[in-house]
Image (spheres, grey):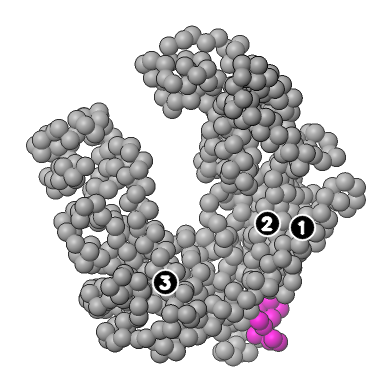
Amino acid sequence: MKNFKEKLALVPTKPGSYQMKNKDGVIIYVGKAKNLKNRLKSYFTGTVTGKTRLLVEDIDDFEYIVTSSELESLLLEITLIKKYNPKYNILLKDDKSYPYIELTNEKYPTLKIVRNVKRRKNKNHLYGPFPNATAARKTVNMINRVYPLRKCEHLKKEPCLYYHINECLGYCTKDISNDVIDKMKKEIISFLKGDASIITKKLEEEMYKASDTLNYEKANELKYMLEDIKTTLKKQKMDLNQNYNFDLVNYYSDKNYLSIEIFFIREGRLFGRHNEIIQTIEEEEDAVVEYLIKFYEKTLLPKELLIPSNLNDELLSNYFSIKVVKPLRGKLKNLLDLARENAKEQIDLQEETLKKDEEIRLNAIKELKELLKLDKVSKMESFDNSHLFGTFYVGGMVVFEDFLPCKNLYRKFKINSDSKDDILAMREVLYRRYYKVLIEDLEKPDLIVMDGGVSQVNVAKEIISSLHLNIPIIGLAKDKTHKTNYIINENLEKLELDKNSNLFLFLTRIQEEVHRYAITYHRNIKAKGALSSLLDLVPGIGNVRKKELLKKFGSLKKMKEASLSELKEVLTDDVALNLFNYLKEL
């Protein structure tokens, strides 16, 4: 740990943002403070534990920027976090957003589940969020079963199966009146807002009708639907005004752990809840604010946010531009206390497991450092390829920090169609990755983990050496049964590893994850079956060229039938050849 006594003496007692750097000059943490001097001194005086200890041990220098207000320092902090993505700042466990249900605002509306709701132009037709994706799907399926909405993405030339089973009105060939559609929309919106009376009555009528016609299987299915609705509404029932729509936030902290609880209140009902336990470095109030900012980057902001009294309501209100309230008594204060109790319960349930997991990880990192004789092994990048019949390779890169996956740093690669084997494909992926690291001055990993033995380590050494980079490399060699057997270092020395050790478990977990990621990328493109998705596999074809191909040929079948010269009318010679060869393999 470096001594910053002289530098700390010069730090002002004003608000601002500070940035911690490691020995490579990489920003590893960004924070803010009302009083920069006091906040920075706190890191280097007294005892620090957990994640804070790891940060302090990693700090080689720090910088700070003075601001005129706390809001300005918050805005600067968030801007710098987005720019540098520091490893010690808060990361959400799941990078995916919560699903919403959308009743589309079209002439013939559809009901569907959507994510990435921030991009939707009309947010008035979104209902959610649904923390439970299964519940969202069940709700959509049930409504589509009861109401004959349009089911297809685009109108067809003749009625489909849904029309014949009475789950669509046949919008493609029938002239459906606006009154019929408006009545359906009104009833569906009423249900999504919590009034289940109309849809419950419809299900009951259908259930009795099925029973009378001896269709007991269908009657039983409808009975379970009704029970699901009643159970859900019972769980959501609250003694609040029906017009209440807000999110409510509270938290509970214990040592370096912070449990954050968010209640989603819609039409006076507890629509859903979200909990996450994180390790914190900054003061708990600052950590909650930073967490909420990251959380609402992917979730729609409520019209109103309720928070505990010790959080800065003015700061949050100014940042989000919404109403922020601190209830001090009554039903809303009781609900706030309930959220805190839930946050405490979650941390009580998980704290021992979290501490044990952290200890195991830190010991495994220490063991790896000793095995490889390295001073630092935190950030690891691993690579794997997938292909179609030995051609049309794709590559995947996964990133782990202290043996935890950083999914926002994962990368996919479309590989040049000239690559005919794993080594050529891997050479291209590694070169593209580390050429970019070199040119754009990106943070280098502490270790490259190759999924394979001598040949994979050699190709990694070749690329890293050609770019004049200095990054340690290991390979996870497999035995005859394709099970990981031992480690090979960059000198091609065999390093034995206890297969029952936690280090072996963590390394094989990285290996399994990169294999899953690469093969899932390839399978997803193939499984989608859409022309645009299949064309994503062909190097040199982007959105513009896909549109030109669709305009020229109209279908994948016509493209497969086209000659090379016909493809060249739309594409450059090399890209046309790539596509021509690719289509022959399909």
Q: From this viewpoint, which residue is outermost toward the front? A: 214
Query: Mark 1 is on which residue type?
Result: Asn
Local SS, label 2: strand
Q: Earlier in the sequence, mark 3 or mark 1?
A: 1
**Callout 2–callout 1 Cβ contact below 8 Å:** yes
Which circle marks residue 297 in the picture?
Answer: none
- Kindly identify which residue carries mark 1: 342
Q: From this viewpoint, which residue is outermost toward the right? A: 330
Residue at x-position 43% and y-position 11%: 173
Residue range of the region highlighted in magenta in the rendering = 38-49
Residue at x-position 55% and y-position 49%: 97
Name the spot of residue 360 as percent of width and height, x first: 56, 79
Query: Mark 2 is on which residue type?
Result: Asn
Q: Quarter-wise, where is residue 493 in the image?
A: bottom left
Q: Is residue 127 left or right of residue 244?
A: left
Q: Earlier in the sequence, mark 3 or mark 2?
A: 2
Name the spot of residue 257 as percent of width and height, x first: 69, 70
- Kindly identify which residue carries mark 3: 508
Q: Is residue 288 left or right of residue 468?
A: right
Q: CA distance from mark 3 to mark 2?
A: 29 Å
Q: CA distance from mark 2 to mark 1?
A: 9 Å
Can you say whether 87 is above or below 520 in the image?
below
Q: Is residue 526 left or right of residue 270?
A: left
